[in-house]
Image (cartoon, rainbow, N blue to C red):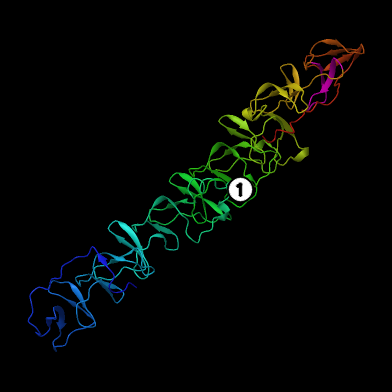
Amino acid sequence: MIKKGMAVTGLTAALTLGTAFSAWAAAGWVQNNGQWQYQDNYGYIVKNEWQKGADGQWRYLNSSGYIASDTWVDDEYYVDSNGIMVTNGWLQINGSPYSDEGTSWYYFDAKGKTVKDGWKKIGSKWYYFDDGGLMLTGWVDQNQYYTQESGEMLTGWQLLDPPEDADYSSDMEEDYDPFALSEHDGRYWYYFKPNGKKMTPREEGGENGVVRIDKDYYCMNQDGALQYGWKNVTGDSGIAGYKYFLSSGKMVTGWYAAEAPRDLTQSNGGVHWYYFNSKGVPKSDVDGVATVKDLITISGKIYLFNEFGNPVYGLRKVYLSENSGSDGEYTSYYFGRNENECWAHKGRQQVEEDSGETNTFYFNESGRGYTGVRDNSLYFVGKIQRAQDDKYEVVNVPGKNYGVLVNSSGKVMKNTTVKMSDGTRYKTNASGQVVKIGEDNVSNITGREPEEPDWTQDGWYY
């Protein structure tokens, strides 16, 4: 503890002993060599005890029986330069139990005892003291709280150096935490609740977790240091385990463009678009097989996201059931020519297929490729069906046991007679079915199967 004789500042209470006593009067104060002592009823000088003066103040009589000053008593009390016990107040002492430099602060209660071992509310502020009564500053109470240089407990957001024993090595790579080091000189933001305790995430299997402060969500490591950028908050592999946090620390929702998480492999680099739901989870097709249940409507537009969380573009094959597999029913959706128009387009569209050939497609109001006859043209999963080997060709109608006659522009030939390249005449009815070939009446004539779209194979990534 602090040794006798260390300087005291700010405590100048005058010693007042009240009425003067005659020397060697029984049970009272006496003066000896210009100093005060206390004599008991037997005439002995009291030593190593507390004695209360007529002014109501307590003084300590040392081993010589004189009033002690500027020193500790029993490691729990302190008497000032006037010999009076310090009560209900602060004491500043030069040096500390650990160093001769600087100053130390202690607080004494109404009975003069040093406040020790924990928190004490003084006025409207909270302070923390060690087992010797020394007021502590910085990280305290198992690094769960922080007190500023004046000793006052902090609350709210604070930009601080990490605790000495903290290891944030995984946060020191620029791709993961570009702000804590470069912008804050190695310091991190922490949030302390109104009761002063540091906010930390619940452990969920990863190094980082999400916390809610007011109405916003933030990412912190398990020690409570604010995190930025892409963070895996679940420990799961794949983009669905990640969330993105701005330089303000706030979690991203809605559309946001960023470079991909470093741990995820994509076909090319650069900045990509992502869409984060209200919980901050990026939309993605986890298994890489697109079904109608993977489609998402955002602000009235329909999107499809790949397994890396990016919206796709181009002509896409989409299965009608999540359990359909590669041999199930499917349709087509057209998500535009590039990443700037990567939503499902509707109505009649000119689509460049993966082969480079441009063809007419038709997509209904839900964006699904149309199958059947519409506007006097035959479509299969959106693609118009044209005569390929002749000016006219019979193409089977999906789901029917007959075909219809189409020309090289894809028009269904209804109620007409046409001449094939070999000179044979085909007559059709009102639905475009061939009912007469040459002079022979026929029915349910079939032809080739509808032509599949040439699905987009690249462009799955930006």
Name the one closer to the observer, 7 or 68. 7
Seen in the image, is 306 located left or right of residue 111? right
In the picture as drawn, the residue positioned furthest to the bottom comes out as: 42
Percent x, y of residue 313? 67, 31
The relative height of residue 9 versus residue 277 in the rendered view (above or below) is below
Seen in the image, is 54 located left or right of residue 379? left
Name the image quarter holding the C terminus: top right
Q: How many labels, in total?
A: 1
- Residue at 15 percent across and 81 percent down: it is 38
State which region is magenta.
Answer: 390-408
User: Which residue type does callout 1 highlight?
Assistant: Gly
Q: Residues within 10 Å of mark 1 (few under 14, many from 20)?
A: some
Identify the secondary structure beneath mark 1: helix
Name the image quarter holding the N terminus: bottom left
- The residue singled out by tag 1 in the image is 241
Name the one closer to the observer, 122 or 314. 122
The relative height of residue 413 versus residue 43 in the rendered view (above or below) is above
Percent x, y of residue 23? 9, 83
- Residue at 77 percent across and 29 percent down: it is 454
Percent x, y of residue 21? 8, 79
Query: In the rendered structure, does residue 373 fall within the stretch colored magenta?
Result: no
- Residue at 62 percent across and 28 percent down: it is 340
